[in-house]
Amino acid sequence: MTARDLIEIWAGRLFAEQKQLVSLGGDQPIAPVSGRLLQTVGTLYLYEFTLPPGRSLEIDTPLSIIPPDDMEPTEGVVLSCRGDLALVQTFDAIGRTVEAATIVPDRSGFLATSAARLTEMLTQPDAYRLGPADRLAPFLEATSGTDDPGVSAASILTTVWSDDVAMRRQRIASMAMELIRANKRILLICPDHHAADEVAGTIARAMKAGGLIYKTWISRYELTLAQQASGLAIQELGFEAQMHQFYAKSRADKAALRRKYERFRELTPLLAYKGQKQKDLDEVRLLEWRLLTQLSDLQAKSKEANAILAEYENLPLLRRLSMQAVGKNMESLHQYLALYESQMAGLTKELDIARARIEELVPEAAVPKDMRPEFEELKDDIVRLGGTKKIRELLAAEEDTNRQAFIQNRRLVITTAARVLGDPLFSRVRFDVLVADNAPLIPPPVLLGSAGLVLERIVLTGDTRDIAAVGLWTTPEAAARSPR
C-alpha cells in the first residue's frame, strides 16, 4: 500500500467524520466562559479560559470567541486544554479580562480543511512529493508495537525508538544541528504544544552548547506556552515574535530611510540656491575687482597729471616741447584731470552698488559648516541604494508581512502536525526533512499531511510500545471498515 492509498482512505474518513459531526450538532457553543490575557506577541494574543464543568476543547481546533457587551467576536485556535483550563491563541485582543464570553468551536471546519488538504495532495501530484511519505506505509499498517520494518540511518526514513524521552530528544537535537549545518530545512512536529516547547528548549540548549546562534535557526510556529524550557527563554523563538521583530526593524529602517530621503530633498534645492547665489557673488566680486583695477589706474593717471602740473614751469624746455607734441600741455592736462575725476566718480558709484550687492549675497550664499558634509553623506547613501527613483519605489511599496517568505527563511520550524494540516500557510512551503517527535501519538492523517511537504527524508522518534497502546496507527483495512 502506498501513501496515496493511505491518504485517500484517511481523507474519506475525515470527510465522513466531519459530516457526522455536523449532523449530530457536535460543535455546540460553550458558555459562560471567563478568561484572562496571558501574553501579547505582535498581532497574536494568548488567553487562558476557564471552561464550564464537563466541557473541553481538542487542541488545534479553530474557534470563535464572542465577548459580552456587543464587542466584536474574534477567531482563535486551541493550543492546550487541561482540565477546565484552555489556552487559546487569538488574532484580536478582547480585553485583559473576559467575563461571560461564549466559545464556538469549529471542529467540523478543521476536519473539512484537513480532508481538503489531503485531497489536494492527491489531485495536485506536481505540488507534493509523496516518495518519502510512501515509507510511512509499513508503520501505519502495523498492528503491534513490535513490528519495525528495519530501516537504517542512511535510508529515506529513519527511526529513533527508545523509552527514554530525554535520550530521544538529544538525538533529535544532534540531528537538527547536523542538518542545519548541511543547509537543510527541517519541519519538526509534535503531538501537542507543550511537547513542542520542550523540544524547542532542548534543541536550543544543544545549539548554544555547540556554538550555533539558536535564535537564528529555530522558530516555534505558535505562541509558546512556557516561559522557559531547558533553562532558556523560548518566547523569543516564537515565529510571531521573530516576524514582529523583523518587520519592526524593517519599519524602523524604512522610517530612517524616509527621513534621509526627505532631508536630501530638503537640502538639494537649498544647496542649489546657495550655489547659484555663490555664483552670483563670484561674478559681482569679479566686477568689483575690475572696477577697483580701473579706479586704481585712473588714480595713478590723475596723480601723474597733478605731479606734472605742479612742476610744469620747472620742466626743461625740451621736455615741455615733447609733451606738447603728444598733446600734453597745461590746458589739456586740466582736461585730462577733469575727465579722470568724472570717470573715477562713475567707478566709485558702480563700486558702491557692487559692494552693496556683495553684502546682500554673502549671507544668501553662506552654507552652514555642517550642511555640506551632511548633504554629501546623504548623497552617497542615496547613490548606494540605487538612486532617488529606487528609493521612491521602496518608500511607496506597501508594508506586506509576508508570512510565507518569512517562514521559508527559517531552518527549523517546530509545531504540531495538526497545525501543519490545518494552517493554509503550510500548503505553500516545503521542507527537506520531517522529524516527528513521539510519532506514535500523532494520528496518521496529520502525519501523512506533514510528510507530503517533505522532499528528502523522514525521521520518526518515540516508544514502539505506544503504537499498540495508543492505537492510532491502524491497518488501512481496519480504517476502511470503520463506521462512516
Image: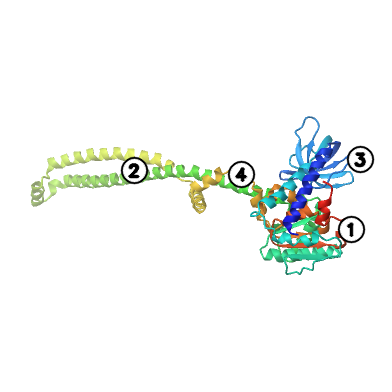
Q: Which residue is mark 2?
A: 284
Counting residues from the start of the chain, the first of labels 4 and 3 encountered is: 3
Marks 4 and 2 sit apart, C-alpha to C-alpha, by 52 Å
The amino acid type, in three-letter code, at marker 2 is Val
Q: Which residue is mark 3?
A: 53
Residue 321 in sight here: yes
Which secondary structure, mark 3?
Answer: loop
| Comparing labels 4 and 2, the label whose residue is closer to the camera | 4
Q: Which mark is residue 469?
A: 1
Which secondary structure, mark 4?
Answer: loop
The amino acid type, in three-letter code, at marker 4 is Glu
Marks 1 and 2 sit apart, C-alpha to C-alpha, by 100 Å
Marks 2 and 3 sit apart, C-alpha to C-alpha, by 94 Å
Marks 3 and 1 sit apart, C-alpha to C-alpha, by 29 Å
Q: Which residue is mark 4?
A: 399
Please say if 266 is above or below 133. Answer: above
Instruction: Say left or right for 74 vs 328.
Output: right
Counting residues from the start of the chain, the first of labels 4 and 2 encountered is: 2
The amino acid type, in three-letter code, at marker 3 is Pro
Marks 2 & 3, CB-CB < 8 Å contact: no
Q: Which is nearer the eye, 244 or 64?
A: 64
| Comparing labels 4 and 3, the label whose residue is closer to the camera | 3
Which secondary structure, mark 1?
Answer: helix
Residue at the top extreme of this rendering: 70
Specify the quadrant that holds the N terminus.
Answer: bottom right
Q: Residue 405's x, y, as percent?
A: 64, 51
Instruction: Say left or right for 146 vs 321.
Output: right
Q: Which is nearer the eye, 476 or 271?
A: 476
Count residues near mark 3 (Cα–Cα under 10 Å), then give few for <14, some for 14-19, many for 20+: few
Counting residues from the start of the chain, the first of labels 1 and 2 encountered is: 2
